[in-house]
Amino acid sequence: DQQVKQNSPSLSVQEGRISILNCDYTNSMFDYFLWYKKYPAEGPTFLISISSIKDKNEDGRFTVFLNKSAKHLSLHIVPSQPGDSAVYFCAATPSTGANNLFFGTGTRLTVIP
Amino acid sequence: DAGVIQSPRHEVTEMGQEVTLRCKPISGHDYLFWYRQTMMRGLELLIYFNNNVPIDDSGMPEDRFSAKMPNASFSTLKIQPSEPRDSAVYFCASIRTLGTDTQYFGPGTRLTVL
């Protein structure tokens, strides 16, 4: 049973606009959340993370928002660039850090020039 | 650093054959993870090792799957016998320590079982 869900398999956005990728989780024990980005024929690479004690974490063009009561997190990319086109995986873990990760199925983002 | 190395990058085999996937973690990383990626389930953790010892293999789907880590720089994931439903991309990842680090993934092995 998927404990981390990404209900949108794909998303298309115009260059320069905001991309919003969503993720829901079911396990209230999850304490740490991460986003990974994956290009074709490569492994996922870490993008940004957030601890459950925060509701927002920002790193340049990337911001992750966490709504614990709704068990929902989102990744905002502003402004979107063609190089952001990739598959984005949401992940969660009940422990602090990157072990024992539960991943979603991914959202394919296409940024149109 | 060369990053996590996986081989082969692609494997095509026939049902019933044995398949062995290989992984070399980043030097100095104490934890190694094996994942399987499918369209339906995304990335699933199969097993992970700490200092070459298997810690959690609850994700291994069946007895047909086995994993070993004979030393700090090498791990294998074996499927015997393979079945068409095993077709997926298999990733290996490593981290130095728990608690603060992010996982570093290899490029994956795309397995096709005919």
Image (tube, rainbow, N blue to C red):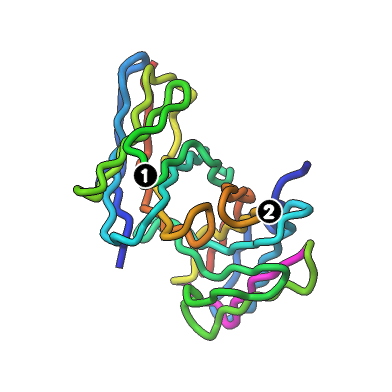
Mark 1 closeness class: few <14, some 14–19, many ≥20 residues within 10 Å = few
Quadrant assignment, res A113: top left
Residue type, mark 1 in image: Ile
Q: Nearer the viewer, residue A12 or A72?
A: A72
On the rendered structure, is A62 left or right of B77?
A: left
On the picture, is B56 further left or further right than B22?
A: left
Q: Do labels 1 and 2 share a chain?
A: no
Residue A65: % across, % down? 32, 35
Question: Which amino acid, mark 2?
Answer: Arg
The magenta stretch spans residue B20:
no
Residue occupying the point 54% across, 76% down: B57
Residue drawn 72% across the image and 68% down it:
B51
Q: What element carries label 2?
A: loop
Can residue B86 be seen at all in this image of the molecule? yes
Which image quarter holds the N terminus of chain B? Answer: top right
> As drawn, which residue projects farthest toward the left?
A70
Disc 2 crowd rating (10 Å Cα; few below 14, some 14-19, many 20+) is some
Q: Which chain carries label 1?
A: A
Residue at numbered disc 1:
A53
Does residue B66 sit above or below B28 in this rendering? below
Residue A105 % position (x, y): 36, 52
Residue that mark 2 sits on: B96
Which numbered disc covers residue A94? none
Chain holding disc 2: B
> Which residue, as the protein is rendered here, is positioned at the far front?
A53
The magenta stretch spans which residues? B74-84
Residue drawn at x 41%, y 60% is A94
In this rendered view, identify the residue nearer to me: A106 or B27. B27
